[in-house]
Amino acid sequence: MFWGPEEDIKTALETVEERCRMAFAGVPNETRRPLADGTTVFERVLPGADRMYPDTDSKCGSGACPPTPTPTC
């Protein structure tokens, strides 16, 4: 059963289906925040191949970026 704005029902169903499929593959690689009632809520995806926005990751770790100049007074 879904309860909410009609325009959100399709997305909610797709999200529940996706999470069910992920559960068969194991525990998702993510950070969750515990709540007082013992449940948790999603916070963020952990670093790795399945990051949500990999294009924002720094490429400088491989030495591809020039060194940052140190300011002088």
Image (spheres, grey):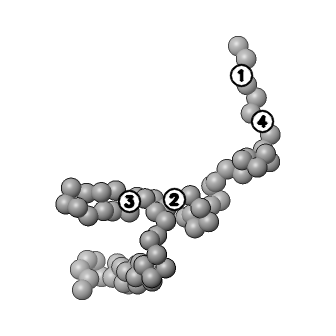
Residue on which disc 2 sits: 46
Nearer mark to the viewer, of 4 and 1: 4
Please, what is the three-letter code of the amino acid marked with disc 1? Pro
Whole-number angstrom distance, CA of label 4 to CA of label 1: 12 Å
Distance, label 4 to label 3, CA atoms, is: 35 Å
**Dot 2: what SS?**
loop
* Mark seen at residue 52: none
Where residue 55 sits in the image (x, y, percent)? 65, 59
Judged from the image, the secondary structure of the residue bearing numbered disc 3 is strand
Who is closer to the viewer here, 48 or 71? 48
Disc 4 crowd, CA 10 A, few/some/many (<14, 14-19, 20+): few
The residue at which mark 4 appears reads as: 67
Disc 4 and disc 2 in contact, CB within 8 angstroms: no
Residue found at the very far left of the displayed protein: 37
Label 4 is placed on what type of residue?
Pro
Give the spatial CA distance, label 4 vs label 2. 27 Å
Question: Which label's residue is closer to the chain start, 1 or 3?
Answer: 3
Q: Residue 31 lies in what quarter of the image?
A: bottom left
Q: In this view, does 44 lie to the left or right of 6?
A: right
Residue 71's label in the rendered image is 1
Q: Where is residue 37 in the image (x, y as percent from the top left)?
A: 19, 60
Task: Give the residue drawn at x 57%, y 63%.
Answer: 51
Q: Residues within 10 Å of mark 1 (few under 14, many from 20)?
A: few
Q: Looking at the image, is 62 positioned above or below residue 11? A: above
Q: Are marks 1 and 2 in contact (CB under 8 Å)?
A: no
Q: What residue type is labelled 3?
A: Arg
Question: Residue, x 23% and y 80% (percent of image)?
Answer: 3
Tell me the element at label 1.
loop
Cβ–Cβ under 8 Å for marks 1 and 3:
no
> Which label lies toward us, 1 or 3?
3
Disc 3 marks which residue? 32
